[in-house]
Amino acid sequence: MKMNTNTTTENAASPGDRDLLAHVQKVIDGHEGPLMIGREGANVEVPEPLFHILTKAVRLLASGQSITITSANEEFTTQAAANFLGMSRPHLVKLLEDKKIPFHFVGTHRRVYLRDLQMFEALRAKQRREALDKLNERVIAAGLYDSDYKGEE
């Protein structure tokens, strides 16, 4: 496991660990409230948000995937932010300069918080959904939804 102050990365579980994780998954899927037992036997109630994070981590590790846990305050370089959003770095920089995504400078370099990238991504998904809904309404209004129209030939 590699660690720095903001990020923890777990490597994919070994086949032996997957069996153990499968057993943990059965317990997780039960109906009891989430508890954690400390090394010295003390029971500690686990808050629901943390419980959901842990259960998702177990599922992913059990299926052989790797996980990364990152703080919403993690700072991304412009290249890392562009990669996260699946766009080119120049396009991201244009979005930053147009104030579509908040950023700050560290020295002369732009940095973007993960939380701001996630908010932009959610807004972009909402706008796409609304555009598709409007297009669908136009198709239905034109009577083309169930038509046998195949386009120009």
Image (spheres, grey):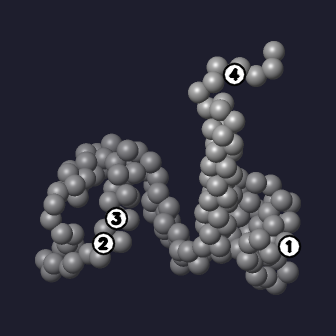
Mark identifier at residue 97: 1
Q: Secondary structure at mark 4?
A: loop
Instruction: Tell me which corner region of the image, top left, top right, bottom left or bottom right, holds residue 78.
Output: bottom right
Position in image of residue 88 (x %, y %): 80, 55
Position in image of residue 92 (x %, y %): 80, 63
Query: Which tag, 3 or 1, sits closer to the chain's start?
Result: 3
- Identify the residue position indicated by label 2 in the image: 48
Question: Which residue reaches farthest top?
Answer: 153
Position in image of residue 114 (x %, y %): 62, 71
Q: Secondary structure at mark 3?
A: helix
* Residue drawn at point x = 71 percent, y = 64 percent: 81
Tell me the crowding category of disc 4: few under 14, some 14 to 19, or many 20 or more residues within 10 angstroms, Cα based. Answer: few
- Measured in 3D between alpha carbons, the distance from the residue under mark 4 to the one under mark 1, in whole angstroms, is 44 Å
Q: Nearer the viewer, residue 105 or 139?
A: 139
- Identify the residue position indicated by label 4 in the image: 149
* Residue drawn at point x = 67 percent, y = 49 percent: 134
Q: Judge left or right: residue 116 versus residue 49.
A: right
- Measured in 3D between alpha carbons, the distance from the residue under mark 2 to the one under mark 1, in whole angstroms, is 39 Å
Mark identifier at residue 129: none
Position in image of residue 63 (x %, y %): 37, 44
Q: Secondary structure at mark 2?
A: helix
